[in-house]
Image (tube, rainbow, N blue to C red):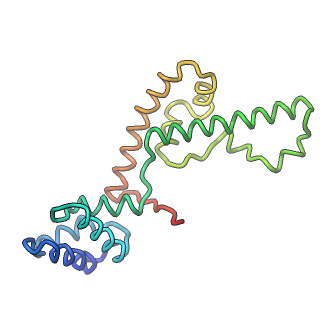
Amino acid sequence: MLARKSIIQALGLATATFPNYPATKEMIDSYSLLLGDLEVSEDQLMTAMANVLKSQPFFPTVYSIRAELVSSLFVLAPSSAEAWREILEMRDYRRDKIHNLQFIASGSVEWNQYKDSLDWRRAFNPRWSHKAIADTIETLGGWSEVYSVIDKNEGISTFRSQLWKIYKEYSEAEDRNVYLGRTQTRKELA
């Protein structure tokens, strides 16, 4: 939880930049109430405030500070194109595993050569990078159903359009939860 003292310090930076906007008790109360639920450090808040002050010509709103913090520290849903790319990559991964199984079944390759080195479960029950992708796949009947549609490549444009509509609903809901502080999955630092 963000301490009131940290919010006062950040507002001090903003009021020093915009002297016509003094930090009143009401302003401090409002910003504390609306930013206090975020699990960020004082340094992270000050960095976000500095970024907002450098990038907009008006006094920072709660929304602009919160958006800066959320986008820099927490995981938001990938774009529809990124989600589609992830699904296609998983389709290709599964194709490769099925191809390997066919070689093994034909006797061309021994099972012992492959059984320990390949992640078979991932091909048939993938772990998606974001909950919105997993929820979309589940809504469309599960990974086996989605795989069979995109593997055949028949009606893929219509299917992709349906997938994107469903994904948009899930991704917007997940992102809204992040912005409202209901879910805060942190980005991994490199």
Q: Quadrant of the N terminus?
A: bottom left
Please name whichever residue, 187 or 58, is drawn nearer the observer in this view of the structure: 58
In the depicted structure, whether residue 12 falls above or below residue 98: below
The residue at the point 29 percent across, 77 percent down is 3
Image coordinates for residue 69, horizontal then vertical, percent: 34, 63
In the displayed structure, does residue 19 sit left or right of residue 117? Answer: left
Image coordinates for residue 181, horizontal then vertical, percent: 34, 59
In the depicted structure, whether residue 62 falls above or below residue 147: below
Q: Quadrant of the C terminus?
A: bottom right
The residue at the point 75 percent across, 33 percent down is 98
Give the total of numbered labels.
0
The residue at the point 48 percent across, 61 percent down is 187
Among all residues in the image, which is located at the extreme top?
154
Q: Quadrant of residue 65?
A: bottom left
The residue at the point 38 percent across, 38 percent down is 169
Please name whichever residue, 64 or 26, is drawn nearer the observer in this view of the structure: 64
Please name whichever residue, 158 or 38, is drawn nearer the observer in this view of the structure: 158
Q: Quadrant of residue 13?
A: bottom left
In the depicted structure, whether residue 41 falls above or below residue 151: below
In the displayed structure, does residue 124 sit left or right of residue 139? Answer: right
Image coordinates for residue 116, horizontal then vertical, percent: 82, 50
Image coordinates for residue 31, horizontal then vertical, percent: 20, 68
Q: Quadrant of residue 62?
A: bottom left
